[in-house]
């Protein structure tokens, strides 16, 4: 029944990067430079025009830790540590275990970089589990917020911003001689993209380790238990379809990951705080941008899409 729901659009905002065929907002996002791929999942830049007094109520739900830089707009987030309000700022966002409510007032510019699982460990960053559903200044990952803001010119082109962020990560990798993240985490990330219905016992076999080691590595590098990671991946894939930023050829496969409709509704109420139909029928521009970037990253990781290739929803 959810296959027939057309995702709602917020007509009060105007994304500079354009929209999908279904009218959903797009960001400028791409894969990292090849030498950064073991640590960096992707980068994005979003410029959205809106009336100065218009407040967009939406949310974020990401499976990756992010460095996010707000170059314009006033925003606030409901985090696990309480409400945080800010203007221009560079913040480290831990991955999410559930939907994080976000409000943005006026036009906004957001630039960011998504880290691969285990990257924070390899880059001598914080314990990722301590930052689940939280955000703090980027000083915690040895990239001072003031320095980042000083190097990002608000009137520059999106690709210029992304090159600056890549250069800062590259500098950090070279400065400490960072190792690549644990290959077990990389393999489990692929499982979460390819088959999030897999049992943890089977995932351990695919990863070539004992179940206890898999649980230890995933808890360290994803910030949550393997079962939670896969549950989140199922929900994010289905949400991407409902918001019109997934490969429609995968719709049936995504739906069959749930036992029945009641299972799907229960999972969405738990993770998004709304039903699947509500998620589709309520404008969700910021969430949609996040989901679109993840689906692009996912299809590239599964070698179903080449970097820079036109995406199925475009």
Image (cartoon, helix red, strand yellow):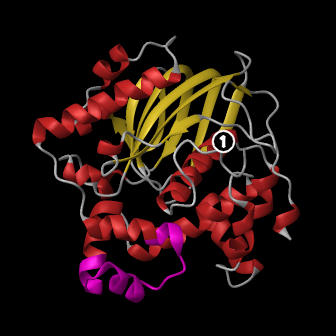
For image coordinates 48% across by 69% down, the residue present is: 192
Residue 221 percent location from the top left of the image = 30, 61
Q: Secondary structure at mark 1?
A: strand
Residues rendered magenta in the picture: 191-214
Q: Vertically, is 294 above or below 69?
A: below
Q: Vertically, is 309 above or below 26?
A: below
Work out whether residue 244 or residue 96 is closer to the camera in this orientation and state it: 244
Work out whether residue 161 or residue 243 is closer to the camera in this orientation and state it: 161
Residue 302 percent location from the top left of the image = 50, 63
Question: Mark 1 — residue?
Answer: 58
Residue 15 percent location from the top left of the image = 69, 28
For image coordinates 46% across by 86% down, the residue present is: 199
Quarter holding residue 304: bottom right
Q: Dot 1: within a 10 Å radius of its alpha carbon, few (fewer than 14), some, or many (20 or more) residues?
A: some
Number of disc labels: 1
Report the quarter where the N terminus lies: bottom right
Report the quarter where the C terminus lies: top right
Work out whether residue 253 or residue 54 is closer to the camera in this orientation and state it: 253
């Amino acid at each position: 029944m959810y296959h027939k729901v057309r995702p709602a659009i917020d007509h009060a905002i105007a994304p500079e990067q354009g929209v999908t065929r279904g009218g959903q907002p797009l960001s400028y996002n791409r894969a990292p430079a090849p030498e950064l791929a073991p640590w960096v999942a992707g980068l994005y830049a979003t410029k959205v025009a809106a009336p100065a007094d218009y407040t967009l109520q939406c949310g974020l739900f990401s499976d990756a830790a992010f460095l996010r830089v707000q170059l314009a707009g006033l925003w606030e987030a409901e985090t696990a540590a309480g409400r945080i309000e800010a203007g221009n700022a560079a913040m480290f966002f831990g991955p999410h275990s559930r939907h994080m409510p976000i409000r943005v007032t006026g036009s906004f510019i957001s630039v960011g970089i998504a880290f691969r699982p285990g990257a924070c460990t390899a880059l001598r960053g914080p314990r990722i589990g301590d930052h689940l559903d939280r955000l703090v200044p980027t000083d915690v990952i040895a990239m001072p917020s003031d320095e980042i803001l000083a190097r990002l010119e608000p009137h520059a082109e999106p690709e210029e911003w992304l090159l600056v962020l890549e250069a800062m990560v590259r500098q950090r990798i070279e400065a400490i001689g960072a190792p690549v993240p644990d290959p077990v985490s990389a393999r489990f990330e692929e499982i979460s993209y390819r088959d999030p219905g897999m049992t943890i016992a089977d995932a351990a076999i695919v990863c070539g380790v004992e179940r206890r080691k898999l649980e230890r590595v995933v808890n360290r590098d994803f910030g949550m238990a393997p079962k939670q990671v896969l549950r989140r991946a199922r929900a994010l894939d289905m949400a991407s379809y409902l918001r019109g930023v997934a490969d429609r050829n995968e719709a049936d496969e995504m739906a069959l990951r749930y036992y029945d409709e009641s299972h799907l509704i229960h999972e969405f109420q738990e993770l998004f705080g709304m039903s699947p139909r509500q998620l589709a029928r309520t404008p969700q521009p910021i969430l949609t941008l996040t989901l679109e970037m993840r689906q692009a990253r996912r299809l590239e990781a599964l070698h179903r899409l080449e970097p820079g290739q036109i995406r199925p929803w475009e």
